[in-house]
Image: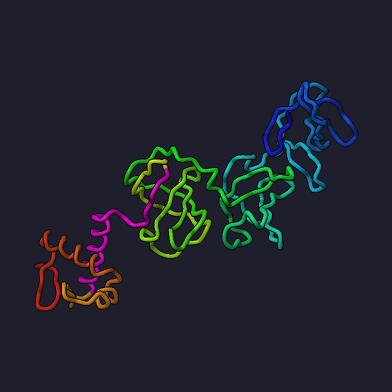
Amino acid sequence: MIELGRVQKLKIKRFASVGAFLNLDGSNDEDVLLPKSQVPEGAKEGDEIEVMIYRDSRDRVIATTNRSKLEVGEMGHLMVVSQTEIGAFLDWGLEKDLFLPFAETVGALEKGKSYLVGVYLDKSDRLCATMKVRDMLRTDSPYKLDDKVEGTIYSINRDIGAFVAVDDQYDGLIPTKEMIGIYEVGDPVQVRVTNIKEDGKLDLSLKDKGYVQMDKDGEKILEKLKANRGFLNLNDHSSPEEIRKELRMSKSGFKRAVGRLLKGEIIEFHGDGIRIKE
């Protein structure tokens, strides 16, 4: 059968002044028009043509030799070209933009920005987009613990965390405690795999692994020491507020980093602070 939203090979059944009518051999579907401007030069009845099937601005099923950026069941990033009270319209590469219903929107949209969406057929047999892609994501990723991966935030729950489509294919979650900074739906992220659940879903973190973070904190402390002639008036007894004001890091992070620098004999305690060891 002829399928909406998919690329198919159809045969030319007949010609008319408006173009060529296509169909599948033995199909009970109505013939589909390929507009005259898109009929290949020299085409004749019986020729097979690869076309995309969609609905035009008058809601007629029509064929095109142009290629959409996505087909039914696929996910990808499409740009918002206009917005209305009932939804938004996305550029998916065809003459008629793809409709994103308001009910299928997650968060606020911005014209000109691209969002991760999936393409589906609604109950009225219309081609539509959805930002609610969780059910389209897979749970058979090839990743292992501590792998660095990239993805797109597709939903945010302030109590749970940010849901991520890893590689825009696999389902993952950044728990709230693993978040750093402020993110919005549609933002790309680089994260680390911290757990692979029994169902295959991934737990993720925006934070580096402990020892890596400690190294970065150590580098920050050394940079600050060098900028202050080798001395900082901070120690284990300094308040969290003093440490955060001076270094923009937590007290626990400061203590871990200082411990590593002391062990490496890079710094030493001096008076009420720390200094670079001579």
Instruction: Between residue 144 and residue 82, name the one nearer to us.
Output: 144
Q: Quadrant where the C terminus lies? A: bottom left
Q: How many marks?
A: 0
Q: Residue at x 45, y 57 (%)?
A: 162
Q: Where residue 174 appears, x then y in whole percent?
A: 41, 55
Residue range (magenta): 201-227
Q: Please, what is the dominant secondary structure of the magenta stretch?
A: helix
Q: Where residue 184 appears, x then y in whole percent?
A: 50, 61
Instruction: Between residue 157 and residue 70, name the one nearer to us.
Output: 157
Q: Residue at x 41, y 52 (%)?
A: 190
Q: Where residue 260 appears, x then y in whole percent?
A: 16, 60
On screen, residue 165 versus residue 6, left or right, reads: left
Q: Is residue 209 found inside the magenta-colored segment of the image?
A: yes
Q: Note whether 96 is above or below 269 in the view shown.
A: above
Q: Is residue 181 found inside the magenta-colored segment of the image?
A: no
Q: Quadrant where the N terminus lies? A: top right
Q: Residue at x 63, y 44 (%)?
A: 119
Q: Note whether 271 is above or below 40 in the view shown.
A: below
Based on the displayed image, in which of its 4 quarters is residue 94 positioned? top right
Which residue is farthest right? 17
Q: Residue at x 55, y 48 (%)?
A: 133
